[in-house]
Amino acid sequence: MAKIVAVLLLALFAMSILATTVLATNGKHHHSKKYGPGSLNPSQCLPQCTRRCSKTQYHKPCMFFCQKCCNKCLCVPPGFYGNKSVCPCYNNWKTKEGGPKCP
């Protein structure tokens, strides 16, 4: 009887891990398609950068660098500021001085 209970608990534990892994993979896959690396076509950079730079007072430089970064990374983070971790290429591209290149 103890062996049956142990096997059932082990099977339940394994199913729980599998379900968690599947849910995490599905969530990550969906999120990365919308915002992650390579989620855009080059033709989508202008509208995404327009959205990203719409609330800054430095609109022209923001648009210039955003489009440059988007064309290289094929990704623009969500929102108007921050959220760069969604786009590692966009986040990690630095200026000669070591500051962020992408807005």
Image: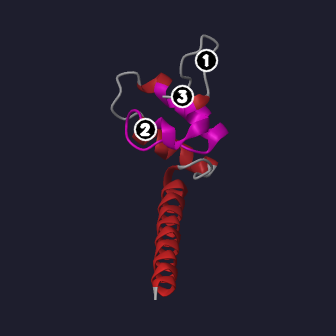
Of the numbered discs in the image, which one, if any, rests on residue 95? 1
Tell me which label, 3 or 1, sits earlier in the chain.
1
Q: Is residue 83 above or below residue 41?
A: above
Which three-letter amino acid code belongs to the residue tagged 1?
Answer: Thr
Tell me which label, 1 or 2, sits earlier in the chain.
2
Graded by Cα atoms within 10 Å as few (under 14), some (14 to 19) or many (20 or more), the crowding at tag 1 reads few
Residue position marked by numbered label 3 in the rendering: 102
Q: Which type of secondary structure does the marked residue at label 3 adopt?
A: loop
Provide the residue span drawn in magenta: 62-91
Q: Residue at x 39, y 33 (%)?
A: 81
Secondary structure mainly formed by the magenta segment: helix
Residue position marked by numbered label 2 in the rendering: 83
> Is residue 24 or residue 77 the one in the foreground?
24
x, y percent for residue 62: 47, 27
> Is residue 73 or residue 98 the one in the foreground?
98
C-alpha gap between disc 1 and disc 2:
19 Å
Of the numbered discs in the image, which one, if any, rests on residue 46? none
